[in-house]
Amino acid sequence: MNQRVICTLLLALFWSGSLAWAEEHYEVIVERNVPATMHDGTVLRADIYRPKADGKFPVLLTRTPYDRRAEIDFGPVAAARGYVVVAQDVRGRFGSGGEWYTFKYESQDGCDTVEWAAALPYSNGKVAMYSGSYVGATQMLAAIASPPHLVAMFPQITASNYHEGWTYQGGAFALWFSQSWTSGLALNTLERRVGGESKASRWDMDLPLAAYPVLDVDTSEGVAKYYSDWVAHPDYDEYWKELCIDDHDANIKVPAYHQGGWYDLFLGGTLRNYMHIKARGGSEAARHGQRLIVGPWFHGPFNGKTGDIDFGPNARANQDVYPMEDLRLRWFDSVLKGIDNGMAQEKPVKIFVMGRNVWRDEDDWPLARARETRYYLHSQGKANTLSGNGELSTAAPAAEPADKYTYDPADPTPTRGGGLCCDNNHEPSGAFDQRPVEARTDVLVYSTPPFKADTEVTGPVSVELYASSSAVDTDFTGKLVDVWPNGYAQNLTDGIQRARYRISPERAEFMNPGEVYKFTIDLVATSNVFLKGHQLRMEISSSNFPHYDRNLNTGGDQGHSTRMVKAVNSVYHDHEHPSALIVPVIPQ
C-alpha cells in the first residue's frame, strides 16, 4: 500500500558561475513505495518526487541497485525545478520484487519503466534517465531497447561492454572491482534471504536449546550467482554479447551527456559510448546530440582530490566549476524543456587537462589535431627497476639486447592507485607515487630525458610490445607515468593484456615458449601536460595485483586453477621488434 508524504521543502538553492535558474520553483510532493508492474508481472518499487502543482512535467528516472532512498537529496531539488523524479529499485533489490542478477533484466525492465513513467498522470510523456556506474548501465541497457518515450540520458562513469572494461580487461579478470563490488551487493541479497526465511518455527523442535542459530543463512549459494558466471565465461561469448552496448549502438536514439574520469575504471567505456553513439546512433538526435565531460576523477566523490594529488578548485565538480548536479539539470532544461540557457551553443566536449589543471572545450574526442607519436623502448638489457638503463625516445631502435625479468605469481607486482573500485579504504584509487613499484626487479622502467618545453599528451594511449615467455600463458602490463623534477612518479593510466587473448577476446590461443609475439596493450586514454623538466615514463611488468587477477602461467582454467609456475619474460626492442609507447601529442 502506497504511503504518500506531502511536504513543503524550503530550498535555498543556487547555481554557481554563469549557470541560471529556470523560472519554476515549486513545493514538492513525495510518494513512497510506488509500484510498477513489469512485463512478466514482477512488481518494482519507486519513490516519486514531483511538483505540488497542476499540470504535467518531464520525468527524470533513475533505476538503481543501491537503494532508491539515496535520491533524497537530488529528488527534491529537481522536483522544485519542475521535474518528476522517479527513483526505482531494480529487480531483486531493496523494495523491488524478483531475482537480482546483474544486467540480465535491465534492458526490458528499463524499457517497461520508461513507458510506465511516461504514462503517469503528472508526466508530460518525456522521460530522461540519469546517474552513474551500474545506474549508468541501467540507462544504456534501457536505451538499446529503444523505449518510445525515452528522450535523453546523463550516464556517468559507466561502461560500454560488460566483458571488456567491466569484468575483464585485455582478458585479465578485474579482480578487485569484481570481488569488492560483489561483496557489497551481496549484503542486501543476504538480508532479503534471511528476512524471508528466518522464523522461530523452523527450529522450535531442535535440541539442544543452545544450538538455536538466531539467523540461519543456510548456504551462500545463489547470493551472487552472477560472479561465478563471470568467472565461468572468460571468453567474450554469447553470455556477454547480448548485453554489449558497443554492439547495439544503432538502437540508441537519444542524445546523451557522458561523464567520465581520467582515473575512473570505466573511462574506456565512457569514451566509447560517446564516440560510438555519435557515429552509429539510431537517429539524427542521437548522432548529433552526444556530449562528453572528463575530469581528473576516480570512481568516487568528484571533489578534486584523486589519490595523492589535489587538482585544485577547478576540479571540484561537487561545488565549483562543473557541479554535476547543476550540469545535469542544465542539460535537461535544454533538451527536455527547450530552455535557451546557452547549452546548445557550447562545444560538445569538455576535458580537464592535468599538469596545467585547466578545463578546455573541444570540438570532438579524440582530438583531430593530435599527432600519433611513438616513443620507442631502449636499453642495454638492464631496464629492470628505477635504477636500470631503460630509456624512451622517438628514435627507432637498431641492435639492442632484450630486457628480461622473472614474474612470480606468488609475489605479484602490487597495485598502487589507478582506476579502482569499490573499497577505497583498502585499495585507494587515483594518483600515487610509483617509485615503490619501480624498485622491483620484475618491473622494467623506460623514461625520456626531462622535457625542455611543456608537452601535452591528450587522447588514446597504447603500447606495442614484442615479447616472449618461458610459459604458455602470461600477462603483460603497461603504465604511463609523469615523473616530476623531484622524482615523484605520478601514474596516469595503465592496462594489461593476457597472452592467451592477444589475438581475440573470443578465444584463447596459447604461446609457444620462447617464441616472440606482438602484443598490443590498451592503456585507454589521458590528458596531461608533461611540464618543462618533467619526464615521460613507461613501466612494463606482468602483474598489477589485486587490480587484476594473477596469471598463474600454466594455461589452466582461470577460474579454478591453483597450480602456479614462475615465468621468465623477455621484452624486445630492436630493428625487427620495435616495441613502443604510442601517445597522441598535441601541437603547442
Image (spheres, grey):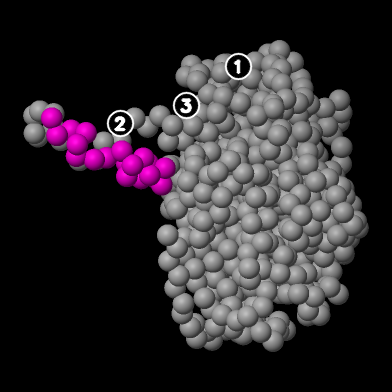
At x 9%, y 34%, the residue is 210
In this orientation, which residue lies closer to the viewer: 424 or 403?
424
Amino acid marked by disc 3: Ala
Residue 293 coordinates in the image, percent (x, y): 73, 63
Residue contact at pointers 2 and 3, CB within 8 angstroms:
no
Residue 580 coordinates in the image, percent (x, y): 79, 38
Image quadrant in which the N terminus is located: bottom left
Provide the residue designation for mark 2. 218
Q: Is residue 236 visible?
A: yes
Amino acid marked by disc 2: Asp
Residue contact at pointers 1 and 2, CB within 8 angstroms:
no
Neighbours of disc 3 within 10 Å: few (<14), some (14-19), many (20+): few
Q: Which residues are magenta?
A: 187-205
Tag 2, which secondary structure? loop
Q: Quadrant of residue 587 in the image?
A: bottom right
Closest to the camera, between mark 1 and mark 3, is: 1
Provide the residue designation for mark 3. 410
The answer to whether residue 155 is magenta is no
At x 81%, y 69%, the residue is 361
In this orientation, which residue lies closer to the viewer: 132 or 302?
132
The residues bearing labels 1 and 2 have C-alpha atoms spaced at a distance of: 35 Å
Single out the residue that lies furthest toward the top: 512
